[in-house]
Structure formats: structure tokens, C-alpha cells
Image (cartoon, helix red, strand yellow):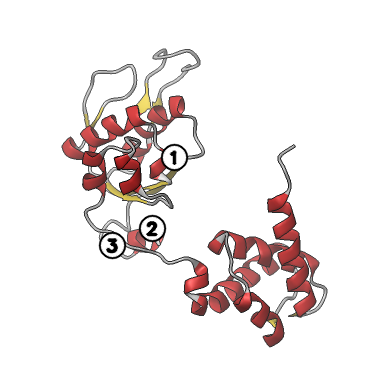
């Protein structure tokens, strides 16, 4: 959705950058966002350009913004209000023009009530809200998404997979997809690996779903 918004906007000719706030340690997140200069901290052996500067004139997608550290939330608020960043270790102000698209699967209003998310930052990022329903509530998207992913993985694995059988498609439509589109993509990837025929069978899809479920249920090593 974020990519679609970017590519259909007047900023489409500029950079589209992404950053997952849940996958990067909080101590490194500031550098990823704003950059740093050489020698500003241990291990900073060269200058680093942050996402805001790279995406200047374009779009920065902040995924899982509900996981952002509270200290960094305050810095983000200032940047969004003033459009100015400072690299770690530098006092030089860099003017930026970046459109922010953020996403989260958390209840930010509850987090505000619990003191886990800044209310002022919440109102700053919630200029326009788009609610994307879970895949189980928009089953009409499953068929085109599955066919797209099948074509993608068939090309990747050099397989002649032409279509998903109607019976196999019914299996996909009847599943609840707790992992949403990411889970569907993983299942279709496994389907492409398991398939030996041009038409994907029901059993192959069932095996792929079971394999995905088991891989997500195993305890970490």
C-alpha cells in the first residue's frame, strides 16, 4: 500500500525508503533515520547518510512505528514539525522534505493511555488514516495475490506453474490467514517448491499451509 501511494503520487520520481522500527535495535535506529558522522560513537568509522536525507523529496515508510523507542519518538516529533534533521555527532541542520507513511498493528491509542506512545507524535503522524483489513476480511484479494505470487516464484525456481486448480483455490479461500499477505506469500513459495505439475493441486496447497503452520509453531532454537 505504501509503495502504491508513493508510485501514484507527484513524488514517484524520487526515492522510496523503508525502515522497520521493530527490527533494528533502538540504539541504532537514530543513526538509520538521521545518519551520523565519523567518530561520533564507537564503531562509527565513516559518515553514514540516514533515511531522511536519502528520501529527501520522496517518501519514507516507517513500518511497525508502535515499536519505536520513546526517546526517539521525541526526536521524530521535532523532525516532523520542523523538517530539519541533525546527524549524530554534528550540529549542522539539514533541511528535508519527506513524506512519512507509517504502519502498525498495535493499538496506539491504548499505548498512549499506558504511557508507551507520545500523544503529540500520534496526532502528527495521523493526518490521514488508512485501515487495511486483515486478509481474512478481504477474501476477494486472495486469488489475484496468489496468482501473482505463483508467477513470481515459478520464475524464481524456473518451474512451469501455470495456474492454481479451482479446488486448491477453494482451500486458500477457506483459510483464515492469521499471518495475512506475508503468510500467503510464504505458502505460495512453498507451493511452488513442492509442485511438479503445471497446475497446482489441492494436496500441494494443503502441504504448504501445514508446513508454514508448523514452521511458525516451533519454539526458537
Q: Residues within 10 Å of mark 2 (few under 14, many from 20)?
A: some
Residue extending farthest to the left is: 82
Q: Secondary structure at mark 3?
A: loop
- Give coordinates of residue 140: x percent, y percent: 50, 80
Query: Viewer-nearest of labels 3 and 1?
Result: 1
Instruction: Return the x and y of residue 113 as percentages of the image width and height.
Output: 30, 41
- Report the Cα–Cα distance between label 2 and label 1: 15 Å
Comparing marks 2 and 3, which lies closer to the viewer? 2
Q: Residue furthest bottom?
A: 166
For mark 1, give the secondary structure: loop
Quick check: can you spot residue 72?
yes
Q: State the count of labels.
A: 3
Outermost residue on the front side: it is 114
Nearest to the observer: residue 34 or residue 172 = 172
The Cα–Cα distance between marks 3 and 1, rounded to whole angstroms, is 24 Å
Q: Position of residue 181 (x, y in %)?
A: 54, 63
| Residue occupied by mark 3 | 9
8 is higher (above) or lower (below) than 139: above
> 110 or 41: nearer the eye?
110
Instruction: Report which residue position mark 1 lands on.
Output: 21
Q: Residue furthest right?
A: 196
Disc 3 and disc 1 in contact, CB within 8 angstroms: no
From the image, which quarter does the N terminus lie in?
bottom left
Name the disc covering residue 2, or none: 2
Q: Nearer the viewer, residue 32 or 111?
A: 111
Task: Of the two numbered discs 2 and 1 on the same chain, state the one appearing first in sequence.
Answer: 2
Give the x, y percent position of residue 28.
Answer: 45, 27
Question: In the rendered view, does 190 fall on the left or right side of 28?
Answer: right
Identified at 71% across, 59% down, the residue is 212
Amino acid at each position: 500500500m505504501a509503495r502504491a501511494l508513493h508510485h501514484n503520487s507527484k513524488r514517484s520520481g524520487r526515492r522510496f525508503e523503508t525502515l522497520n522500527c521493530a527490527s533494528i535495535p533502538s540504539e541504532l535506529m537514530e543513526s538509520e533515520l538521521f545518519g551520523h558522522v565519523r567518530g561520533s560513537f564507537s564503531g562509527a568509522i565513516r559518515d553514514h547518510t540516514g533515511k531522511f536525507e536519502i528520501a529527501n523529496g520522496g517518501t519514507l515508510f516507517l513500518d511497525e512505528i508502535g515499536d519505536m523507542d520513546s526517546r526517539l519518538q521525541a526526536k521524530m516529533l521535532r523532525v516532523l514539525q520542523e523538517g530539519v534533521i541533525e546527524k549524530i555527532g554534528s550540529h549542522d541542520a539539514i533541511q528535508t522534505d519527506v513524506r512519512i507513511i507509517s504502519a502498525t498493528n498495535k493499538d496506539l491509542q491504548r499505548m498512549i493511555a499506558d504511557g508507551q506512545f507520545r500523544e503529540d507524535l500520534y496526532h502528527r503522524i495521523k493526518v490521514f488514516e488508512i485501515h487495511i483489513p486483515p486478509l481474512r476480511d478481504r477474501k476477494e484479494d486472495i486469488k489475484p495475490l496468489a496468482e501473482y505470487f505463483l508467477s513470481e516464484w515459478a520464475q524464481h525456481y524456473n518451474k512451469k506453474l501455470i495456474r492454481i486448480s479451482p479446488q486448491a483455490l477453494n482451500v486458500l479461500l477457506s483459510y483464515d490467514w492469521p499471518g495475512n499477505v506475508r503468510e500467503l506469500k510464504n505458502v505460495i513459495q512453498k507451493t511452488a517448491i513442492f509442485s511438479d505439475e503445471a497446475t497446482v493441486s489441492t494436496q500441494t496447497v494443503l502441504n504448504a499451509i501445514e508446513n508454514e503452520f508448523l514452521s511458525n509453531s516451533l519454539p526458537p532454537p
